[in-house]
């Protein structure tokens, strides 16, 4: 009897371990054995439900593999519009990277073997990796929100210094400390980075595009620094970023390759097609970086954004954390690239308590589905236009509590995200490229409401399964979810109760 019990435990542990490795077919095999050999056990009750989820997760992983394949097709069959950049064209021609014999490409296509050669050179390890669900700052909001004042100004030296020292106090809560807010002329970008370097010991991000060559070289061989840069968006290049991108890659800095394409505005409206275009654009930047400096560190910064009902970028939209979790899964499950996502922020501006609650709602949703390195999560508000030190402190304090709750109540199961399928991704992206954008494309019209339907699907599933996040009630507490919009006293009481446990 004891041997049977031990065998059952080994089977169950093996199933959970396979889930954690994203080997869902293998996990299903273990769960199936439990149901077959021990049908009356408590483990079998769970296993029956997990078998259904393993099928959903297997299908989801299949979609991410297709996204990776289709992104490479975009680069080899459609191409990226860099013909107007002599520098980029010469770089790729010297490397014999361009497929000049392609008859179907709209722009400049890469040779398939060269694409694969460069992608294989991108390092997939990261010595300063803070791990999954590492929340932090970022986005460099242009304005500092000052209590009781309406002036739209960046931070000055003294204010930036205070923010950095405060961040150091919350180094246990910050997985990455990106430049938290833009600064005025009282302090340079390099001086900002030096303050961050002096006070914050872990992973940091700056941007070197406005720095001198000597200043840029400071970040070379620094595993605790990322140089945030971008070059490709909307299937073409940004002229002002060509020189900074090339300089940073040549310097050997660890590159955070950013692409903030917006669904239905600068990219496709369907979740799968949006991820595919963003992934293609980041892969192209990886190819350029490896061409310039083979083996240079590249973090996948595909950060998808969504439009709200008013037609503007909306960090309060429930689709924002979902699409960013999907992008994280693409890299965690399939490519193996270190990656950064976005979330935990809010479009709310003039109501700090509500902004803090909404940010926690987003962070907890992201945590439930799983992300890697999450920027924009602490202190930002107003669709990343403002940084608030008050909100930053509250975000970090709540994150401490949320992590304690998570550590005590978490399960080891992987939760299906049910990413919607789109069988016309490559065709749709080609149409969008031909028409100069997504607004007039049939593909866009056919996918109106795709994000809303996705959220409805998850909400429906959440009501049926205990370990699914309740997407409309995710400010979590030990005694149950604290509803979005609950007053501050309720949260404070919840926090005090938990910390006394």
Image (cartoon, grey):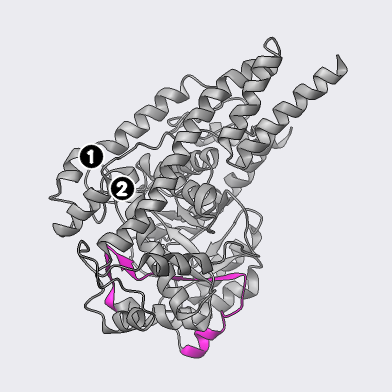
Q: Earlier in the sequence, mark 1 or mark 2?
A: 2
Which residue is drawn at the image coordinates 64% and 34% (left, top)? 412
- In this rendering, the answer to whether 469 lies above or below 334 is above
Residue sticking out furthest to the front: 101
Which residue is drawn at the image coordinates 61% and 64% (left, top)? 126
**Image quarter in which the C terminus is found:** top right
For the residue pair 235 and 377, the one nearer the viewer reads as 235
Which residue is drawn at the image coordinates 33% and 65% (left, top)? 151
Which residue is drawn at the image coordinates 37% and 39% (left, top)? 318
The disc label shown at residue 265, or none? none
**Image quarter in which the N terminus is found:** top right
Relative side of 25 to 313, left or right:
right
For the residue pair 96 and 486, the one nearer the viewer reads as 96
Residue 83 visible in the shown view: yes
Q: Position of residue 50 (x, y in %)?
A: 57, 24
Q: Position of residue 188 (x, y in %)?
A: 46, 81
Q: Position of residue 410 (x, y in %)?
A: 64, 34
Q: Which residue is mark 1?
A: 447
The disc label shown at residue 273, or none? 2
Label 1 packing within 10 angstroms: few (<14), some (14-19), many (20+): some
Task: Name the element at disc 2.
Answer: helix
Label 2 packing within 10 angstroms: few (<14), some (14-19), many (20+): many
The span shown in magenta is 213-239
Do labels 1 and 2 touch, CB within 8 Å?
Answer: yes
Residue 475 located within the stretch drawn in magenta: no
């Amino acid at each position: 009897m004891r041997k049977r019990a031990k065998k059952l435990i080994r089977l169950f542990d093996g199933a959970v371990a396979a889930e954690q490795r994203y080997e869902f077919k293998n996990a299903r095999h273990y769960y199936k054995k439990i149901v077959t050999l021990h049908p009356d056990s408590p483990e079998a009750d769970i296993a029956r439900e997990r078998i259904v989820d393993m099928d959903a997760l297997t299908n989801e992983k299949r979609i991410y593999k297709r996204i990776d394949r289709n992104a490479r097709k975009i680069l080899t069959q459609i191409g990226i519009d860099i013909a107007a950049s002599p520098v980029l064209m010469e770089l790729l021609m010297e490397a014999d990277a361009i497929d000049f014999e392609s008859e179907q490409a709209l722009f400049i296509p890469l040779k398939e073997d060269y694409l694969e050669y460069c992608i294989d050179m991108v390092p997939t390890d990261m010595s300063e990796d803070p791990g999954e669900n590492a929340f932090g700052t970022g986005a460099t909001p242009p304005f500092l929100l000052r209590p009781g004042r309406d002036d739209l100004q960046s931070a000055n030296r003294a204010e930036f210094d205070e923010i950095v020292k405060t961040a150091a106090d919350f180094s246990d809560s910050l997985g990455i400390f990106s430049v938290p807010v833009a600064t005025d002329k009282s302090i340079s970008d390099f001086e900002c980075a030096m303050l961050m370097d002096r006070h914050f010991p872990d992973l940091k991000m700056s941007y070197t595009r406005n720095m001198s060559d000597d200043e840029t070289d400071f970040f070379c061989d620094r595993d605790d620094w990322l140089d945030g840069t971008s070059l490709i968006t909307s299937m073409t290049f940004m002229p002002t970023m060509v020189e900074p991108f090339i300089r940073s890659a040549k310097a050997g800095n660890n590159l955070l390759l950013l692409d903030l394409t917006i669904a239905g505005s600068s990219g496709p409206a369907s979740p799968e097609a949006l991820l595919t275009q963003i992934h293609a654009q980041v892969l192209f930047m990886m190819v350029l970086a490896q061409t310039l400096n083979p083996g240079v560190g590249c973090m996948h910064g595909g950060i998808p954004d969504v439009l709200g009902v008013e037609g503007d970028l909306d960090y309060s939209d429930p689709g924002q954390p979902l699409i960013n979790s999907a992008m994280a899964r693409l890299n965690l499950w399939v490519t193996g690239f270190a990656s950064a996502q976005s979330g935990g922020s809010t479009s709310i501006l003039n109501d700090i308590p509500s902004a803090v609650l909404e940010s926690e709602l987003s962070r907890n949703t992201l945590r439930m589905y799983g992300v890697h390195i999450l920027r924009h999560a602490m202190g930002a508000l107003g669709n990343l236009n403002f940084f608030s030190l008050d909100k930053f402190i509250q975000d970090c304090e709540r994150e401490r509590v949320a992590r304690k709750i998570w550590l005590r109540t978490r399960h080891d199961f992987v939760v299906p995200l049910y990413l919607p399928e789109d069988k016309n991704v490559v065709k749709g992206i080609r149409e969008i490229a031909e028409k100069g954008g997504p607004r007039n494309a049939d593909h866009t019209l056919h996918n109106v409401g795709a994000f809303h339907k996705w959220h409805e699907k998850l909400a429906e599933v959440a009501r049926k399964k205990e370990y699914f996040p309740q997407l409309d009630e995710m400010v979590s507490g030990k005694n149950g979810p604290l509803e979005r919009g609950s007053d501050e006293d309720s949260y404070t009481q919840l926090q005090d109760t938990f910390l006394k446990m």
